Structures are given as C-alpha cells and as structure tokens.
Image (cartoon, grey):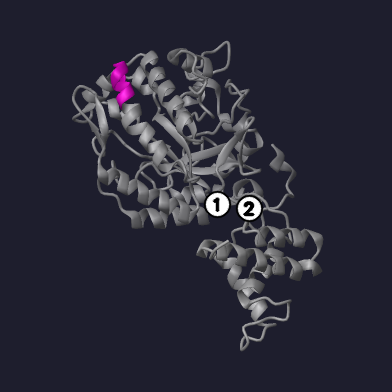
Amino acid sequence: MGELRPTQQAANFNDRRGAEILAAGRWLHPEHREATGRFASGLRCILAATAGDALNKVVSYSNLSTRRLAIGNLTLAEAILLMLAWSTAQEPARAAFGDRITVSGSQFTAGADRIWINGANTPWHVWNEFGGQFDPGWWDNHLRQLHENGINATRVWISCNGEVGININSAGQVSGCTPAFWTNLDSLFQIARQRQVYIKATLISFDHFSNSHQHYLGWRHMLTDSGNIDSLVTNYVVPFAIRYRDNPWLWSIDLCNEPDWIYENEKCGRIPWEWIQTYVARAAAAIHANSQILVTVDVCMGPKYTARPPGSNIVSDQALQARVRGDARARLDFDSPHYYDWEHVLRGNPFYQTPAAYGLETNKPIVIGECPAKGTANHTVAEDYEAACTNGWQGVMAWTSNGVDSNGGLSDLTPATRALRDKHKRLVFPGEPGATPGHSSDSH
C-alpha cells in the first residue's frame, strides 16, 4: 500500500483513540455514552469555559507525573474530552439567548424558545455617526448597561439623514458607502455580539427627504425614480444584509423610520405611497433573497396606515407584492407601529388593548417600535410594558435609552425593563440560567 501520508496517519490514530474513548465510556449512562460517541467521532465542539471546569475535575483524580489516567489507556487530554462529553449529556440541549430571532405565527422565537422584545431605541449617540464621529467606547458601555437592565434589543439608526456614509449624487443615484461607514458598523455589531443586545437596524428615515439639510433633493430623486431605487437597494441595502447576515445579533432591518411623514409633510416632499411601497418591496425582497434577517418598516401611525380591512394597510403583503410582479419575498416579517399620546385620537392607547382591538392585522408579530420612555398619559412606563406583554404585543421599544430628547432616557426606562425581565425571565433571556418555565402569564 505504500507509506501512509500524514493525514492518513492522523485519521488512523483518531479512529484508534476514538475506539479507546468509546471503550472507556462503557461505564457511562446510555445517554452519556451517546454524547461520548459523538465526541469521539469528532462531531462535537467544546467551549473553553467548560474545558477549564472539566480540567479541574480530572486533575484532582489523576497522576500528572505520568500524564496518564486510570481510565483505560487514555492520555490526560483524552480523559478531559471524555469528561466534557459526559458533562454535556447531563441535560438536553436548549436554545440559548443569542440564537437568531425568527417568526413563529404571531410571536418571535430565539432558537426553539419564545422571546419577547424587552427593548429600547438608541437611535444615535452622535447624529450620522457611522462614517462620522463614531465612538465605540460609548456604545460598548451603553450596550452593557442595556443588557444589565434587562433590555434584550435596541433600535439603531444606521443613517440619520444621509449626509454621511452613503454615496449619493444630486441625481439620486447611490454608488455605495464609505469605508469608514462599514468599519464603524463592523465595530457596532461586534459590540452587540459581545454585550448580547439584539440590534434592529433602521436604514433610512423621513429625515433623508426633509429640506432641513443640504442634499435632500438627491434623496427625493432617489425615491421617485425606479432605477435610482434599484441603486439604493443594490449598493446599500444588499451589501448591508450580506455583510452582517451571519451575525444573529442583527435581528431585524427597519427599512425606513416613519415613512408616513414622507407622504404627509410638505417639508419631506409629499411623495406618493406608490414610490415608498416600491422601495420597501424591492428592498424586502432583496434582503429575503440574501439572508434570514427579519424585515419591517416602522410606520408611525399604525391604525391609519397599517389597519386591517376595511381599513388600508399600505405595507401589506398584497400591496408590496403588487409593486414587484407578485414576488412573495416582498413582505414584512412583523409590524412595528409607534405610539405617542397625540395619537390617542386615532384609536386610543394601544398598550391597554390587544393589537386586534387597536385595528391592526394580527397575522404577524407586532412590536410597539417607539413610545415615550417616561410612559404614556396617566401610566408609568412599567405599566405600559407589562400591559403590552399581557395584551399580546410582542415587544416594546421605548424612545430612548440615551435621552436624545424630552421623551426620557435610561433612568426613566429601566424600572420597566427590569421589572419585566424579573417577572418574565424566560421570555426576555430565553435559555439563560434562571430562565426556566414557571409563569403562566408567559404563554400570552
């Protein structure tokens, strides 16, 4: 047969030592032996933190001078692997907080477990900071504070008004984004992973179209030309989705903050809904074609523009797919209306009624995407969050965690997010220690 190549020698060695590990594992419970077999076959990856604990257990019963153990003919390292396989089989695997968030009917799940968005808005630290004056230290500290206070997700404006980071000319053609823009976002999503806070990324806002900044006409030209919309999707939306699609901490993309004002306000151009729908439809289809990231649009006035029949829903599957020749990927995965007390005249306070009573379609999860961090009229913010959870909303994201205006900040918000975390731990941080079934109210 000739001399064995190094890779063949290694394979034979692994097979032989795997057999010895299996033999040594015969004293284990059948469930533990199964885990040992998986490990010996090279099908299991062990975390370093677990390895340290197992090493202490093994060393206390071993003779390090010979570097051998009294379990068969195993080396110390192989015995550690055996111990690790045994420890991982003691309880069934379960979803961990940090799995990708997906949709299951009208609820969210992280892995196999339901998750409720105990959230906030952290729209910006510095206006237009990605590609501008991004401060990673501030974001690291702030996301740490969010997690410690029970906040599992926050909404971040990736571009505040389009003046920094995105390359767009006066004709409305988007050619891409600056290197600094991507570098700063790389840092943000790494921080989100480390601090364990899910990010809802808002790509553009009505502010892009407002005559309050220098290049607003370019953005209006973008939204009112089919080819220019394609340039935005091709050179901004898709690269964003592809770049971060493997990071589960990017749980969703909000295609536009409060597009209602683009349609209603003269200072934002009063652009017809048909153009806005075209952008949303093409962007949603492109994101779904390239990733598993959830897609939404944060419409401000839910009962006015996302109502169930006989009302009108300008971002329904039917309305969006009509703009892209029936492409089923042109859809929103969940709805995310906003609520402030001036909206009470539309249909009351949503926190204290179900989404259906509020007049919305209920075939998807619905998150209250903005609301005052100080609470709604005659209610504390803690009452608002708990009522939303009780009434079937799938999350709340108060404005804001960092006090960008008079609606409140972290000190106003955290009594609500801590209380909800403490009462519904398995919904807020599913799979974490202490997040075990036990609250009947968690079944809402």
Residue sticking out furthest to the front = 1
Q: What's under tag 1, amino acid-wise?
A: Gly
Can you see residue 169?
Answer: yes
Q: Main secondary structure of the magenta part?
A: helix
Whether residue 268 can be seen here: no
Q: Nearer the viewer, residue 440 or 68?
A: 68
Quadrant position of the C terminus in the picture: top right
Q: On the image, numbered disc 2 is attached to which residue?
A: 422
Q: Position of residue 318 (x, y in %)?
A: 52, 15
Which residue sits furthest top? 310
Task: Tell me if label 1 and label 2 are in contact, CB under 8 Å.
Answer: yes
Q: Residue at x 64, y 81 (%)?
A: 59
Q: Quadrant of the N terminus?
A: bottom right
Task: Give the amino acid at mark 2.
Answer: Asp
The magenta span reads 223-231
**Residue 434, relative to residue 313: is it above or below?**
below
Q: Please, is residue 161 above or below residue 427 in the view?
A: above
* Residue 307, picture quadrant: top right
Q: Earlier in the sequence, mark 1 or mark 2?
A: 1
| Residue picked out by circle 1 | 150
Q: Quadrant of residue 404?
A: top left
7 is higher (above) or lower (below) than 357: below
Q: Position of residue 135 (x, y in %)?
A: 31, 53
Residue at figure coordinates x 22%, y 23% from the top left: 217
